Amino acid sequence: MDDTTNQTPNPWGNATTHNTTLPNSTFVYESPLSPLVDKVLNIIIIIILFLTMISLGCTMEIPKIKAHFLKPKGVAIAVVSQYGFMPLAAFLLGKVFQLDSIEALTVLICGCCPGGSLSNFFALAMQGDMNLSIVMTSCSVLLALGMMPLLLYLYSQGIPNIESMVPYAGIILSLVMTLVPCAIGIAINHRVPRYSPIIIKVGMSILLIAGAAFVLLAGISIGDTLLRILSPRLLITASLMPISGFLFGYTMSTIFRLNGKCKRTVGVETGFQNAQICFTILKVAFPLEVIGPLFLFPFIFSLFQTVEFLVLVIIFRCYKWFKPPAKEKEVYQTVDLKAEESTIEVPQEQSHWPSPDPHT
């Protein structure tokens, strides 16, 4: 009997692997939503993202954006952290936890993705530099067009047609969804700045409501399924990637002496990955019998990074709340009143009347 009948190509290397090594490989996930409802939800999500990105654009100022381009130290640190550390961390975590080849490749694809728009909202919540955050996200997404194929090729030798795995249309759409609404917000803040605070509050309120609804729906629809089909090693890997990215970005920013706002921004931008792009790659590039339930990995990764950064925001806000205000140093100067009086002279031009004659 030919032993290759139950084998599938190993996308991690040149060898082959059996279907039996892929846990739950026969699992078929069926969405609880109808195709029509799914399309409507996608449209609503795009509208919400567009409106909230406009509100983030209202926090940006053109002179500060120019300053980050003229002195791009913060952007350079973020790009190196994003495309240098995160793919390496994904690769090493796959080795440390001895993930299966397809599991390791799934984690690697997630690590090679650019930063997502969600990082901008958490940078705002962490009182970061929003001008730097938007510039970093835009540069990260733009560079993904070339960096993702290169990184996937370098870290996963032996995968044929590696360039076909990168969803260029999705990356371009993500770039448009970042730049266009932010440009509208910047224009509003530049032309009619009095409306910016209102737009920011409305945008953040929409985001909070939509985020709570998304977490609730995700927990109801696929929460139990995710915990049942994904291995503990994969869950631990998904939980370590975001926080390790934040710590690395924050440490690099500290070494290069960025200010507090920029350090928090670089940390947030490094730790966040665009889970939507990862999901698109896994769903389009691999047949279901090969990827199995692992195409749902971006959902659990997104859940971990959201929860972890929410905890960081709470810790940071508590620190700011209980931190005693800095005392202003008062400078006292001794004044010689007699010397002051003796030096006071009335200018001649202040008086327009002739001086009285002492003989009259």
Image: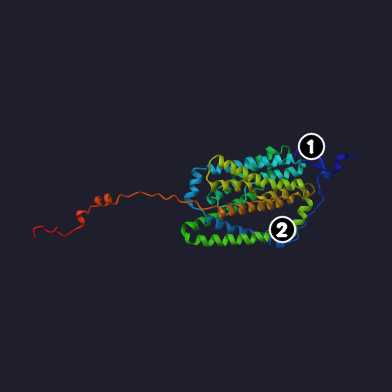
Residue farthest toward the left in the current orientation of the protein:
359
Nearest to N terminus: mark 2 or mark 1: 1
Q: With 357 as the anchor, is 240 left or right in this view?
A: right
Which residue occupies 47% across, 50% down? 63
**Residue 295 rendering spot, x and y as whole percentages:** 74, 50
Question: Label 1 sits on what residue type?
Answer: Ala
Residue at image position (75%, 58%) is 31
**Residue 246 rendering spot, x and y as whole percentages:** 62, 46
Residue beneath the point at 68% across and 42% down: 163
Name which residue type carries label 2: Ala
Q: Is residue 353 above or below residue 151?
A: below
> Considering the numbered disc 2 on the image, is that residue within a helix, a strand or a loop?
helix
Position of residue 39 in the picture relative to residue 66 (left or right): right
Distance (Cα) linking label 2 and label 1 = 37 Å
Quickly name the residue at label 1.
15
Q: Quadrant of the C terminus?
A: bottom left
Please indicate whether residue 90 sits to the left or right of residue 122 in the image. right
**Residue 15 visible to the viewer:** yes
| Disc 1: CA contacts within 10 A as few (<14), some (14-19) or many (>=20) | few
Label 2 neighbourhood size at 10 Å, few (<14), some (14-19), many (20+)? Answer: some
Instruction: Give the residue pinned by disc 2.
Output: 218
Residue 207 rendering spot, x and y as whole percentages:
61, 59
Q: Residue at x 62, y 54 (%)?
A: 314
Number of callouts in the render? 2
What is the secondary structure assignment of the residue under circle 1?
loop
